[in-house]
Image (cartoon, coloured by chain):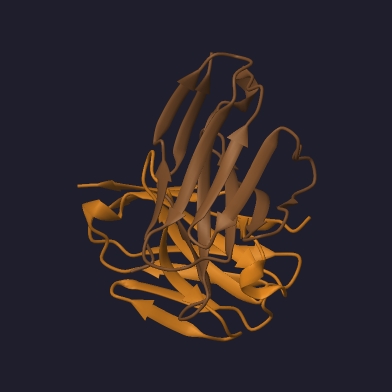
């Protein structure tokens, strides 16, 4: 149980284009999902908290107009990187809150974004 | 913001040895979590700790939630090759499950056969 998937697993795009990443909780409903970013050999940094049916809450320093988050259902949250630039290249990882049994976060496998 | 100090940064050990790593914080956390991350993958939850003083085991892994709520440790006994990876501690504040996690910088475990 508590499986989280992400799609795509990797993506290469040209500078200036937008990229959408999906995060799905496969066997549980997640009213809250989180988006993290991880640069090579570094730790995970929380970008934003996504709540189903409401606006996402962004961490300080994260541009909400650049990283658009939509959590339209209890099993799906999407992160869209708009007008991507090479410095946005990173490993993006989502997690979903499973609150009925353990109230903890389960992570997706991550999406490797490379912006040329 | 909250910061976690995780140590050591890396460990080179022989197969069969025991491993110990810890995290400390300048502020209180209500939940401590330990994750393992393999290259190119998302973190996998190893142990979750919810109460100060709690000691929890998961197979060869044992973790404790410090009494002060500002620290936690993870022990791995009798290490095996598949234990190789990066281990992260993570803390969660008073908002409970609605809060995002603050991660330590990770401990890179390397096992020499």
Residue B60 occupies quadrant: bottom left
Task: Name the residue rendered at 56%, 26% in the picture.
Answer: A89
Name the side, left or right, on which A70 lies relative to B54.
right
Quadrant placement of the N terminus of chain B: bottom right
The x and y percentages for residue A83 are 66, 22
Residue A43 visible in image: no
User: Picture coordinates of residue A9 (x, y %)?
Assistant: 39, 36
Chain given the colour orange = B
Which chain is the one coloured brown? A
Report x, y in % for residue B91.
62, 66
Residue A113: image x %, image y %?
Answer: 50, 28
Quarter of the view holding residue B104: bottom right
**Which residue: 67% across, 39% down?**
A68
Q: Is residue B6 left or right of residue A111?
A: right
Q: Is residue B97 visible?
A: yes
Q: Residue at x 57, y 58 (%)?
A: A33
């Amino acid at each position: 149980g508590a499986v989280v998937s992400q799609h795509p697993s990797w993506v290469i795009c040209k500078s200036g284009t937008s990229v959408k990443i999906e995060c799905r909780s496969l066997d549980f409903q997640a009213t809250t999902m989180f988006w993290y970013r991880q640069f090579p050999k570094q730790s995970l940094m929380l970008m934003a908290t996504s709540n189903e049916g409401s606006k996402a809450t962004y961490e300080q320093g994260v541009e909400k107009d650049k990283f658009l988050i939509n959590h339209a259902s209890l099993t799906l949250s999407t992160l869209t990187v708009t007008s991507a630039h090479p410095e946005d290249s990173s490993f993006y990882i989502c997690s979903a809150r499973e609150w009925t049994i353990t109230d903890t976060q389960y992570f997706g496998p991550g999406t490797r974004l490379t912006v040329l | 913001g909250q910061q976690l100090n995780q140590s050591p940064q890396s460990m080179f050990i022989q197969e069969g040895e025991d491993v110990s790593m810890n995290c400390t914080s300048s502020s209180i956390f209500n939940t401590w979590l330990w994750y393992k991350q393999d290259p190119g993958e998302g973190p996998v939850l190893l142990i979750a700790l919810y109460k100060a003083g709690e000691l929890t085991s998961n197979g060869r892994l044992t973790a404790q939630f410090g009494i002060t709520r500002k620290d936690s440790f993870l022990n791995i006994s009798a290490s095996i090759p598949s234990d190789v990876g990066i281990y992260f501690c993570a803390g969660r504040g008073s908002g409970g499950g609605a809060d995002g996690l603050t991660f330590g910088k990770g401990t890179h475990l390397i096992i020499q056969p």
